[in-house]
Amino acid sequence: MSEKKRKIHIFDTTLRDGEQSPGASLTPAEKVKIAKQLECLNVDVIEAGFPASSPGELEAVQMVAAEVRRPIICGLSRMIPRDIDACRKALEKAKRKRLHVFLATSQIHRQYKLKKDKKEILQMAVQNIQYAQKDFRQIEFSPEDASRTEPKFLVETVAAAVDAGATSINVPDTVGYAIPEEFGDLIHLLIRKVPVLGREVVLSVHCHNDLGLAVANSLAAIRAGANQVECTVNGIGERAGNASLEEIVMAIDTRRDFMDCYTDICSREITKTSRLVSHLTGMIVQPNKAIVGRNAFSHESGIHQDGVLKKRQTYEIIDPKKIGLSGSQLLLGKLSGRHAFRERVKKLGFALTEKEIDRAFARFKALADKKKYVFDEDIEALLEEGVVRVPETWELNYLSVRTESGKPPHAEVRLKFKGEIRAASSEGDGPVDACYKAVERITQSGAKLIHYGIQSVTSGKDAQGEVIVKLAVSGKEVTGHGTSTDIIEASVKAYLFALNKRLSQMFPQGTVGPSPV
Ligand code: KIV
Ligand code: ZN
């Protein structure tokens, strides 16, 4: 790392402000799990919770403090001794600890929430910072709603907090009100008036996303001289959330030419961390979310896919491997071109001639006109149906399903095998299950159904249903595909297709005996 570049400290508050997302509460064990992953991500500070808020929260912070050793563990506290004492207790076992005290400074909060004047606010801040010094060497002070505080009073409060012993000053845009240029100017002003900020005293920012500007405001603050950002994984948090950790980190990394700073985050852990947080909090990541959304590295248009295949950087500014993904994703659909299709066919293990590719591509385009996405199973089925011929060892001859309310469905199936009709019937949990059981009684294949998917491939009343199944047969997985206007028939056809395919692999020269599988 170049000597000139500044390090930006990543203060993660997923377990405190992130947990304030409506519906996202975490058990102490879940907090520890996330904190351990944040340690792998190499964040500098973990704000583990607000210990005075409940005994369970205090216990959760205690557990994180005892089990996570590398990052600084921080606890949040109001400006009252009872809260500070709760933090002391919660952080007793921490290897490195920080107290984070906050007190609102804006006029609206002073008047309506705290009912205190400026003098009282200043006094409260100074007294409690001094009180905290008996137990804490690292004390962070946040003038809550800083971006709506009169700049002169903000400077006065920050200077008083530094004089009283605060080692970090955090500037919160509590209600996500700031605009990047304006927020950057506020940071410049604070540094000008209190020159230790961003040097001996850490200068931090904490931005909310009410106007969708949390990351932009954080980056503007960094450019203006802030050297710590508070953020959450997936941007979760109170209301519209907090600045997203992964977006800030990857913006700094991708635009290091412009940002001229760095973080110590191990970016390969980003995807894993995002998935863990989403899973444990139940907060689903929107598909188009930058960096960690399902679509963030997916390309749909044929022009883009062709470009990415020729040179990834034509349409991708981040290498997906950098955030722990295996690579870019080309979604095959009606906009995809021949190049992407040929690559996928190769990846699926098919060696086709150019002529075969032409035929398969025409069939693929016809299918893509009917369905939004063409998945790998569809392509396999399409290639096997149209290019690779599968002998119909077992052929559907007759099918009837009886359903009566209150009774399990009953299926009667007849299959043709070497010119001979074999029949069986069965009940099942549903009509498809009854048919599959009857097919199994006849074929004795021992197949296990691994995947069953159904969709309509045409529209209207006589829509064709398309079923794709994946079976495990004699130690191998095979896919099968069946279409019909009757979805039960399509289901049986798909099952038989997969069985016949497996038979053709096991007995390539049509040597299938009387007990085929
Ligand atoms: O948004 C906010 O102001 C906060 C403070 C406690 C830092 O979360
Ligand atoms: Zn906040």
Image: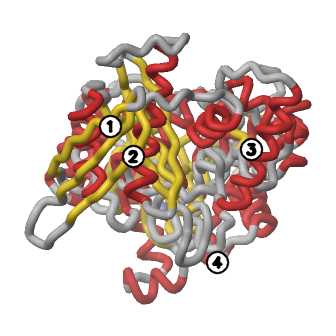
The residue that mark 3 highlights is: 251
Inter-mark Cα distance, 2 to 3: 61 Å
Q: Is residue 254 visible?
A: no
State the scheme by which the image is colored. Answer: secondary structure
In the image, residue 458 above or below residue 14:
below
Along the line of sight, the residue nearer the viewer: 185 or 210: 210
42 left or right, relative to 46: right
Which residue lies at the image location 54% right of the left edge and 50% below the top edge? 231
Q: Are marks 2 and 3 in contact (CB under 8 Å)?
A: no
Q: The residue under label 3 is which amino acid type?
A: Ala
Query: Could you say whether the residue bearing mark 1 is in a helix, strand or loop?
Result: strand
Q: Which mark is drawn over residue 397?
A: 2
In the image, residue 195 above or below residue 266:
below
Compare marks 2 and 4 and give the one earlier in the sequence: 4
Inter-mark Cα distance, 1 to 2: 8 Å
Compare marks 1 and 4 and give the one earlier in the sequence: 4
Q: Which mark is drawn over residue 421?
A: 1
Query: Could you say whether the residue bearing mark 4 is in a helix, strand or loop?
Result: loop
Q: Indicate the position of residue 164 as horizontal and vertical percent values.
A: 47, 51
Which residue lies at the image location 35% right of the left edge and 62% below the top edge? 79
Which residue lies at the image location 86% right of the left edge and 40% below the top edge? 338
Compare marks 3 and 4 and give the one earlier in the sequence: 4
Q: Indicate the position of residue 417 as horizontal and vertical percent values.
A: 38, 30
Inter-mark Cα distance, 1 to 4: 89 Å
Q: Which mark is drawn over residue 150?
A: 4
Closer to the camera: disc 1 or disc 4? Answer: 1
Q: The residue under label 1 is which amino acid type?
A: Ile
Along the line of sight, the residue nearer the viewer: 19 or 179: 19
Q: Is residue 415 visible?
A: yes
Q: Residues within 10 Å of mark 1 (few under 14, many from 20)?
A: some
Along the line of sight, the residue nearer the viewer: 203 or 317: 317
